[in-house]
Amino acid sequence: KIIGFLKRNIESLDVENAKVIKGNAIQVLKRLEKKFDVVFLDPPYDRGLVQKTLDVLKGVTGNGSFVIIEHSPREIFDTGCFSTYREKRYGDTSLTILIKEGL
């Protein structure tokens, strides 16, 4: 259901070069040989998946790329090569926007 919903949204927005990929995010990202400008990340809460995914994302994002993460406010993670652009808390949910900046 959600895959179809996302694809319809992409079509209605007339966005170029957008693709919905179904699968284990960490495994899929390791196989891809692309660089992403924007990544939306909404893993199950409190399983350490934000950190694991960020560790992989450093290799598939370029300078200026954004990573938008929905996560539990209790989850602690190291942003590594990403800088925090903005953070907002909505009850039991936090939204963190990271940007990868050049060295």
Image (cartoon, rainbow, N blue to C red):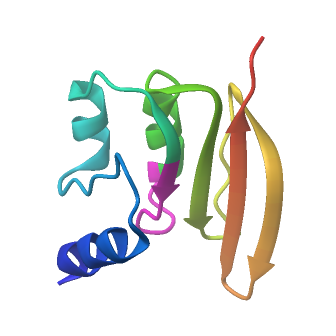
**Majority secondary structure of the magenta segment?**
loop
Of residues 23 and 3, the one nearer the viewer is: 3
Measuring from the top left, give residue 55's x and y in whole percent.
Answer: 50, 30
Which residue lies at the image location 49% right of the left edge and 49% below the top edge?
A: 39
Which residue lies at the image location 35% right of the left edge and 77% below the top edge?
A: 12
Q: Which quarter of the rendered picture does the N terminus lie within? A: bottom left
Taking the view exactly as shown, the residue that stands out farthest to the bottom is 91
Measuring from the top left, give residue 7's x and y in whole percent.
Answer: 25, 70
Which residue lies at the image location 34% right of the left edge and 52% below the top edge?
A: 18
What is the magenta range? Answer: 39-49
Measuring from the top left, give residue 36's x and y in whole percent.
Answer: 45, 35
Vertical side of 76 occupied by 42: above or below: below
Q: Does the magenta stretch include residue 41?
A: yes
Vertical side of 71 occupied by 27: above or below: above
Which residue lies at the image location 35% right of the left edge and 68% below the top edge?
A: 10
Vertical side of 81 occupied by 85: above or below: below
Left or right for 47, reference 92: left
